[in-house]
Each structure stands twice: as C-alpha cells, then as structure tokens.
C-alpha cells in the first residue's frame, strides 16, 4: 500500500538532522503500518472462525 510521499526533503535545504528525522519517522511509520496489518489479519481470522462456529 503506497500512501505517497510522507517525508519530503528539499535538496536545497537538506541537513543531517532533517535526513535523520525523515528516516526515523519513515521507519516508525512502516513499523506501525506492519503492526496494524498483522493485528487486522489476526482479528479478521478470529472473527471468521467465530462466524464459522456459529453456522
């Protein structure tokens, strides 16, 4: 799933700090995204299992 540019750094204004911040934020975003995808799949699986047991 691509959501577009999350951190955009202008070439003219790049600094070590802005690059570090952009990379850190990007890694945090990706980690959170993966966690949410896994949580969704887990809960979806539990829900489907519960629905099947009711039938």
Image (tube, rainbow, N blue to C red):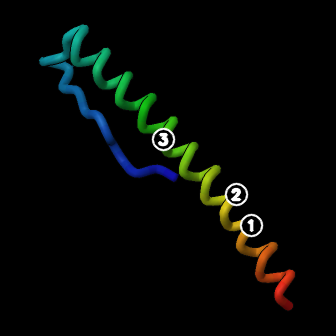
> Looking at the rendering, which quadrant does residue 42 occupy?
bottom right
Q: What element carries label 1?
A: helix
- From the viewer's perspective, is 55 left or right of 33? right
Task: Looking at this view, name the residue that lies furthest to the left.
Answer: 13
- Where residue 1 appears, as percent x and y from the top left, is 52, 52
Residue located beneath label 1 in the image: 46
Q: What element carries label 2?
A: helix
Q: Are marks 1 and 3 in contact (CB under 8 Å)?
A: no
Mark 3 is surrounded, within 10 Å at the Cα level, by few (under 14), some (14 to 19) or many (20 or more) other residues, namely: few
- From the viewer's perspective, is 48 left or right of 17? right
Mark 1 is surrounded, within 10 Å at the Cα level, by few (under 14), some (14 to 19) or many (20 or more) other residues, namely: few
What is the CA distance from the residue labelled 3 to the residue labelled 2? Answer: 15 Å
Dot in front, 3 or 2: 2
Residue located beneath label 3 in the image: 32
Give the residue at x 54% y 51%: 36
Mark closer to the chain start, 1 or 3: 3
In the rendered image, the quadrant that contains the C terminus is bottom right
Give the residue at x 25% y 33%: 8
Whether residue 25 is situated above or below residue 32 in the rendered picture: above
In this view of the protein, which residue sits in the foreground, 2 or 22?
Answer: 22
- Where residue 29 appears, as percent x and y from the top left, is 42, 38
- From the viewer's perspective, is 11 left or right of 40? left
What is the CA distance from the residue labelled 1 to the residue labelled 3? Answer: 21 Å
Q: Are marks 1 and 2 in contact (CB under 8 Å)?
A: yes
Give the residue at x 14% y 18%: 12
Residue located beneath label 2 in the image: 42
Whether residue 7 is situated above or below residue 46 in the rendered picture: above
């Amino acid at each position: 799933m691509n959501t577009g540019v999350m951190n955009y750094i202008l070439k003219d204004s790049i600094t070590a700090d802005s690059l570090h911040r952009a990379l850190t934020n990007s890694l945090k975003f990706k980690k959170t995204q993966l966690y949410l995808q896994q949580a969704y799949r887990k809960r979806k699986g539990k829900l489907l299992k519960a629905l099947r047991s009711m039938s």
